[in-house]
Image (cartoon, helix red, strand yellow):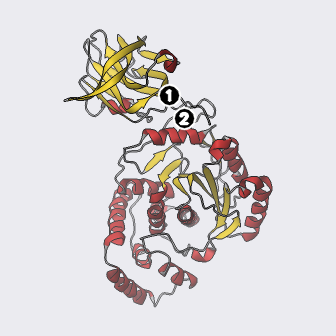
Amino acid sequence: MRLVWKSLDKMRCLRKRSAIPFLGFLITFLLFLNLYIEDGYVLEEDKRQLRESSAHPTTSERYVHTFRELTNFSGSINVTYRYLAGTPLNRKKYLTIGLSSVKRKRGNYLLETIKSIFDQSSYEELKEIVVVVHLADFDLVWCENLVQEITRKFAHHIIAGRLLVIQAPEEYYPSLDGLKRNYNDPEDRVRFRSKQNVDYAFLLNFCTNLSDFYMMLEDDVRCSRNFLTSLKKVITSREGSYWVMLEFSKLGYIGKLYHSRDLPRLAHFLLMFYQEMPCDWLLIHFRGLLAQKDVIRFKPSLFQHMGYYSSYKGAENKLKDDDFEEDSIDIPDNPPASLHTNINVFETYDATKAYSSIDEYFWGKPPSTGDFFVIVFNKSTKINKIKIITGSDDRQNDILHHGALEVGEKLVGTKKGKQCTSYITLGEFKNGHIEVQSVDHKIAFDIECVRIVVTASQKEWLIIRSIGLWTTQPPSQ
């Protein structure tokens, strides 16, 4: 680890536009280097670096020992945390929500954020989450006072194991003096964002084994009602597809979801490049290095920035996510399924895009009478509601002008794949839309297929913007 930090200190970046492609290559190379080269080479090179730098001692000798032994890139980072409130439970949860907080010059929103997380969750949802707060300020008096407030307001959540407050001691941090001045940022700005990267790295490291998934939030956020239920629907709909980071807000570090198994690598990554660039830029590079090329962001957003003053110098920060909805979120379940159509697909706007929860769609050339678009479920299911929207805001005539919605059963295998042999019509499209409620009361069988059938040829192309399916929830036991 010391090798990387010493080596990076010798490099200089270009201005913002030219630096990002270069740093992308640099990050890829160095990550590969540290993950795969032999330990012996690293040790020898580390010794060389130490000899070269012996004539220039660091300003704080404690960092030399700490960071030489801190990580080995193969597991968790060796940090001894202080437990300020609560302790981890033995049982692994579904979701960890991580918050890192420091003292602000103006305003403090941490208590409101914690309150929103708990207040917007049902009793059943609370059983599946754990909130970890990293108080990352070196002012121990401030930390102690804040812990007292947290303990007083959220004692029952702490006792139940739903809330932990931790701190990584200052001696584990790298030197925050003499950092590289990338992008011509002022020295105090570079120090702030570099420390923030380390704050998040230590938080991620602590949360590695607490749950199946990890949600990154900031400490000045408001949550939508039953956000966990919405998250679970999205995660279920992505079963069988590869992803590294799912985004539930378009702002900063808010609402970024990861598999917990990726947290050790992400923590190491933030430490390795802590002084290079802001955390949100590093998150983008990390996602790309793990082969998720495109952003996967869901609407409406589940989290909203509510702070008015930034944690950096108390500057005003009025950013808001205009895709946020607090109460009217009704994300479809969209059970795992395969999709196919005989409509001529335009470029990469394939059938699966209409079934996705993110902002994308199916786009096909003009359909003819009898053309179809079929969803075949991996297993039969009970459907309560179906809602399909065609066309888009900028192509309002690319709707399905004449079509029917059908549901089917009696699935059989054919040379062209699985197909249902029996269908019942639920209704006709009107102005390119259709919505059918209480499907499970109208259909006696468990549904295996949903089919859109073109009932008259049209000259216009066809956009299927969204297909939403809501399953019938089994009665609670």
**Where in the figure is residue 192, as x and y percent of width and height?**
58, 63
Q: 79 above or below 446?
A: below
Q: 341 above or below 150?
A: above
Pointer 2 residue: 323
Q: 124 above or below 450?
A: below
Pointer 1 residue: 470
Which residue is pictured at 46% across the width and 22% down the height? Answer: 386
Element on which disc 1 rests? strand
Which residue is pictured at 42% across the width and 41% down the height? Answer: 238
Q: Residues within 10 Å of mark 2 (few under 14, many from 20)?
A: some
Q: Residues within 10 Å of mark 1 (few under 14, many from 20)?
A: many
Task: Tell me which amino acid carries mark 2.
Answer: Asp
**Where in the figure is residue 101, as x and y percent of width and height?**
65, 59
Q: 294 above or below 146?
A: above
Q: Nearer the viewer, residue 454 or 52?
A: 454
Q: Quadrant of residue 405?
A: top left
**Where in the figure is residue 278, as x and y percent of width and height?**
50, 58
Q: Say if residue 288 shows up in the picture.
A: yes
Task: Tell me which amino acid carries mark 1.
Answer: Trp
Report the label total.
2
